[in-house]
Amino acid sequence: MSEYEPSLQDLKTIYQNDLYAFAKHGLGYKDLTIQTHDPIASLLMGPSKKKLIVVPRGCFKSTLCSISYPIWLLINDFNHRILLDSELYSNSSKFLREIKGHLTSKHMTDLFGEFYSDVNWRDGELTIKQRTKVFKESSITCSGIGAQKTSQHYDTIIADDLNSLDNSQTPELREKVLSHFKMYISLLEPGGKLIVVATRYAEQDVVGYILDSENQDQKKTGLVY
């Protein structure tokens, strides 16, 4: 008896309901492991609006949180608006280039239709073809510390490694990063999700600010390694 081959509809349903399966098998990130990454994927899929994910470098946190997760959000809601932020604009734009590669692959278009749109598919942002609502914001927009995104509104903001060794060594540098982080309050839609993905470089970094300022119940919405 031949081994069961899931149909495209079966795969579509699996991927829309399981971020870990989507990242590992749908996008081909074979280095992801169920022990490390499935709990993070479950947190990202969960109902909490604020999520804190702290893991060491080299653990594929950006692969899951800043590449796979934005795509997963869009295949579940074609009208979702995502701000993809990092210390440097060049870092978030690298994530976006990888995302574009996935969205134009045959596997993804066979499952979810054509994503590419010549209306807004350029360096630093993209708007998918399946969008049915009119927004001034793109489906995914890249940003970095110092970039101004005034008058923009997002359903999900992903802050990936705002702190680094370079910008965490002095109080002045740490305050610049923190001021950028606080700006998110005015950009996030009511009920929107804020995802902070980080590696620790200083006690008084963005993660330290979050842990100090959030109450005990809110702390429980994060997953800290």
Image: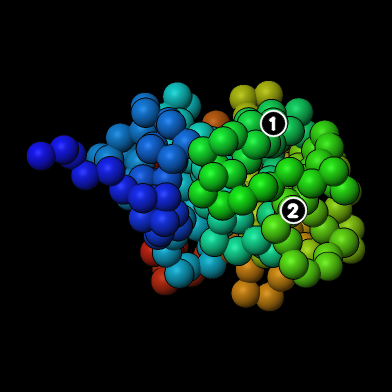
Left or right, 163 with reference to 116: left
Q: Residues within 10 Å of mark 1 (few under 14, many from 20)?
A: some
Q: Residue at x 73, y 61 (%)?
A: 131
101 or 183, which lies in front? 101
Q: Which amino acid, by three-letter code, is at mark 1?
A: Arg
Which element is circle 2 on? loop
Q: Residue at x 65, y 36 (%)?
A: 104
In the current view of this chain or complex, which residue is farthest to the left? Answer: 1
Which element is circle 1 on? helix
- Position in image of residue 123 (x %, y %): 82, 34
* Quadrant housing the N terminus: top left
* Quadrant housing the C terminus: top left
Q: Which residue is mark 2?
A: 129
In the current view of this chain or complex, which residue is farthest to the bottom? Answer: 190
Q: Residue at x 51, y 38 (%)?
A: 107
- Position in image of residue 69 (x %, y %): 53, 48
